[in-house]
Image: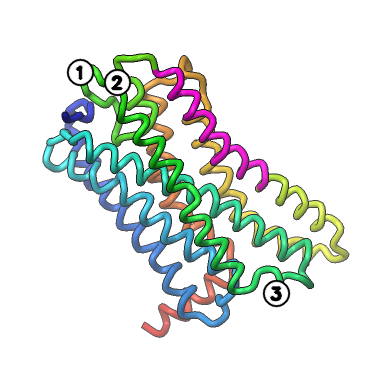
Amino acid sequence: MTFSFYNKKTKLQGLLFVLFSIIYMIILIGNSLIIIITRLDIALQKPMYFFLANFSFLEICYVSVTLPRILVNLWTQDRIISKLDCAIQMCFFLMLGATECFLLMVMAYDRYVAVCNPLHYPLVMNQKMCTKLAVGSWISGIPVQIGQTCQIFSLHFCDCNQINHFFCDLPPILKLACEDTSVHEVSVYVVAILFVVVPFVLILASYSKIIFTILRLPTARGGAKVFSTCSSHLLVVLLFFGSATITYLRPKSGHSAGMDKLLSLFYTIVTPMFNPMIYSLRNKDVIAALRKLLLKK
């Protein structure tokens, strides 16, 4: 059994291929640079940058699940994908999405400890704890997302297997089912609440405490420095969780193919492209490390 991606043939496909290729290169280069400088620069050997390196590697993996396939489809005009390949793509996409939710939550916790309990920070966020939190973020979503993918692809699909989307994602795949999907839709909502809403609420709680602590700092300069460090992370959180929430927690009646495609492009391509810029432009340590690396070259 095979699926096919629905895309109208336009004269802009060549332009889209070039545009997406450039974006993919920007994502790869930008996130790779962050990984390299956090490994090489002694000043960046801190928990915050350890998690940032994990996050950059995650973004490379996350976008590589979908964007290369989109580029192949644009170049060859062959939009057919087997059921197995579609399931594998969706499974990895969901697992990496869950990892991003948990990793952003861990990064918020790191900032919470650093700002609200600075004296205990070296003890709490030691190397062993950082490794456990990072590994936990990577593996926590794997069993659930494998189970959900198997559940979705055990459905009976109609003869018309045209996916009105750029890649295999939950909403467009569920639309192809020829049987009642209400139980599966409930499971999607439950998983979305556990993996999206709960981490988002905990992140907001962490930053509420951080902001309250900043307001109590005796010097405005100290508060501005702390807020500058945390605001870049908060911006990434809002971009990712905002688009993910709209995609997976909207009522079924609120789903439209055009909106789903737009949101998907946003949180799978646009956000990973801007993340290195957000972190580097708003972080003096990262800028200094980048300058040092480039001057050595």
Q: CA distance from mark 1 to mark 3?
A: 58 Å
Q: Which residue is mark 2?
A: 176
Which is more N-terminal, label 2 or label 1? 1
Marks counted in the figure total 3
Q: Is residue 112 left or right of residue 48?
A: right
- Number of residues whose C-alpha sits closer than 10 Å to that of mark 1, classed few (under 14), some (14–19) or many (20 or more): few
Query: Residue 68 location in percent, x, y?
Result: 25, 48
Nearer the observer, 200 or 36? 200
> Do callouts 1 and 2 mark residues in contact (Cβ within 8 Å)?
yes
Say which residue appears at 46% left-offset and 41% top-offset: 144
The three-letter code of the residue at mark 3 reads: Pro
Alpha carbon of mark 2 to alpha carbon of mark 3: how far?
A: 52 Å
Magenta stretch holds residue 198: yes
Identify the image quadrant of residue 28: bottom left
In the image, which residues are magenta? Answer: 181-202
The residue at 49%/73% (across/down) is 38
> Label 2 sits on what residue type?
Leu
Q: Which label sits on residue 122?
A: 3
**Could you tell me the amino acid type at mark 1?**
Cys
- Closer to us: 159 or 242: 159
Q: Residue at x 18, y 44 (%)?
A: 72
Q: Position of residue 58 (x, y in %)?
A: 42, 56
Q: Quick check: marks 1 and 3 in contact, CB under 8 Å?
A: no
- Residue 208 lies left or right of residue 79; in this view the side is right
Of callouts 1 and 3, the N-terminal one: 3
